Image: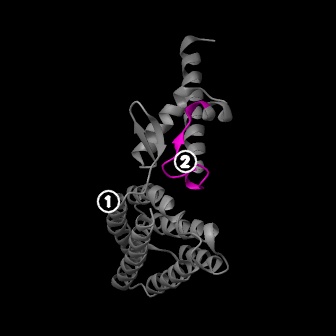
Amino acid sequence: MKPFVQEDKMAKQTASKKQLAYDSIKEMILNGELKTGEPIIERKLCESLGISRTPIRAAFAELSKEGLVDIVEGRGVFVSKIRFEDMIEVYDIREALECMSISLMTDRITSEELAHLEEIVERMKSLTGSKFMALDMELHTTMALYSKNKRLAQNVATIYSPIRLMAATAQNDPVLCATALKEHQEILQAVTDHDVEAAVDAMRRHIHSVKEYHIKKYFLFSSSQ
């Protein structure tokens, strides 16, 4: 085998192992297997995933950019804690991105795409907990995709990593689920009416509602420590 062919094969294998490490660690964090503030033991990951430290460390670097892990020099890698200032920043960015995406989507959505969104909301009616939250986030990222602006959709998808981490602390709240469902229905009604202003207002109210919920939950959590 020629040297450049071997190098290309090795590069692809390294990229594949890095993706495996990234996907596996991210899922362990977001499903609660790795808890907030908990150290991530590199050796255990190498053993469980059957890969070396190099792709593990490359995955840590990517997850750090997404705000899911903290790399502390001399101490190791930890699952990121949900800090108050981070939560506020995430929701400020979320409001800007999702209000833009719903505005574009309302003008550009097809009848088939609208039917798909309505089907997601219909499925949410019979769900609670983590399954409800997973569909909630699927709904929002799909709406961003239907804005037909790829860069905007990519940014919305990225911001949902820390949002999913926050949602893991609230997924067993039936009141939050019921409120979110009602607000989603209001958003889709405005989209159905092709009323851009109403759709943006409904999205903004929804994001403010969830933001206020997490602010109150943060203070309740902090006061119990």
| x and y percentages locating residue 213 in the rendered image | 43, 75
**Residue 38 among those drawn in magenta:** yes
**Residue 37 among those drawn in magenta:** yes
In this view, the residue in front, 104 or 183, is 183
Q: Residue at x 59, y 32 (%)?
A: 17
- Identify residue type, mark 1: Glu
Query: Local crowd at mark 2 within 10 Å, few (<14), some, or many (≥20)?
Result: many
The quarter of the image holding the N terminus is top right
Instruction: Judge from the rendering whether residue 188 lies leftward or rightward of residue 84; answer left or right.
Output: right
C-alpha distance separating marks 1 and 2: 22 Å
Q: Quadrant of residue 147?
A: bottom left
Q: Which residue is mark 2?
A: 26
In this view, the residue in front, 3 or 127, is 127
Specify start and end residues of the magenta stretch as a single range: 29-43
Labels 1 and 2: the sequence-earlier one: 2
- Identify residue type, mark 2: Lys
Q: Which mark is residue 39?
A: none
Q: Secondary structure at mark 1?
A: helix
The quarter of the image holding the C terminus is bottom left
Q: Residue at x 40, y 30 (%)?
A: 74
Q: What secondary structure is the stretch in magenta mostly built from?
A: loop
Instruction: Tell me if label 1 and label 2 are in contact, CB under 8 Å.
Output: no
Q: Which residue is mark 1?
A: 85
Q: Secondary structure at mark 2?
A: helix
